[in-house]
């Protein structure tokens, strides 16, 4: 039993503090927008009175799981999904400022980072 849980009729009840979106964002050092758009898909959330809430225990577990991801695991996923047949390349052609000459476009077929 953790300090934020208690026994009630033989069941463990979690009593971890419920955090608002603002508190969750501050706790994780992220934006409220990120919490609304991303975290609620990755971490259990509850709607209470129409407000989104997160248990601090769930946030701590989420952080713990993220910290267990290794560089090799990230490289493996990158090799699988960041491949040429899924590559999208865009070239933005901003207008020159203050009469400066326009820059030349990169040669066709040049990849980012080449």
Image (cartoon, rainbow, N blue to C red):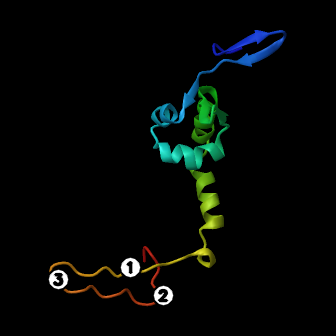
**Residue at (59%, 27%) from the top-left corner?**
56
Q: Residue 52's image quarter? A: top right
What residue would you read off at disc 3?
100
Depth check: give the residue in front, 69 or 45: 45
Farthest residue, direction left: 98
Q: Rate crowding at label 1 as few (under 14), some (14 to 19) or many (20 or more) other CA atoms within 10 Å.
A: few
Q: In this view, does 13 lie above or below 85?
A: above
Residue at (42%, 80%) from the top-left corner?
A: 91
**With respect to residue 11, does 39 lie above or below?**
below
Is disc 1 placed on a helix, strand or loop?
loop
> In terms of sequence position, does the residue under pointer 1 or pointer 2 come before the other?
1
Closer-to-camera residue (90/81): 90
> Label 3 neighbourhood size at 10 Å, few (<14), some (14-19), many (20+)?
few
- Figure quadrant of the C terminus: bottom left
In three-dimensional space, the C-alpha distance between marks 3 and 1, rounded to whole angstroms, equals 17 Å
Asked if disc 3 and disc 1 are in contact, CB closer than 8 Å, the reply is: no
Residue pointed to by mark 1: 92
- The residue pinned by badge 2 equals 109
């Amino acid at each position: 039993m953790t300090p934020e849980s208690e026994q009630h009729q033989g069941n463990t009840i979690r009593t971890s503090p419920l955090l608002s979106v603002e508190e969750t964002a501050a706790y994780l050092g992220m934006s409220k927008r990120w919490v609304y758009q991303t975290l609620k898909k990755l971490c259990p959330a509850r709607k209470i009175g129409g407000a989104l809430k997160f248990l601090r225990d769930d946030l701590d577990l989420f952080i713990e799981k993220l910290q267990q991801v290794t560089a090799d695991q990230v490289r493996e996923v990158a090799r699988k999904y960041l491949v040429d047949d899924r590559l999208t390349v865009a070239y933005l052609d901003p207008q020159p400022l203050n009469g400066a000459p326009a820059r030349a476009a990169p040669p066709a077929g040049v990849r980012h980072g080449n």
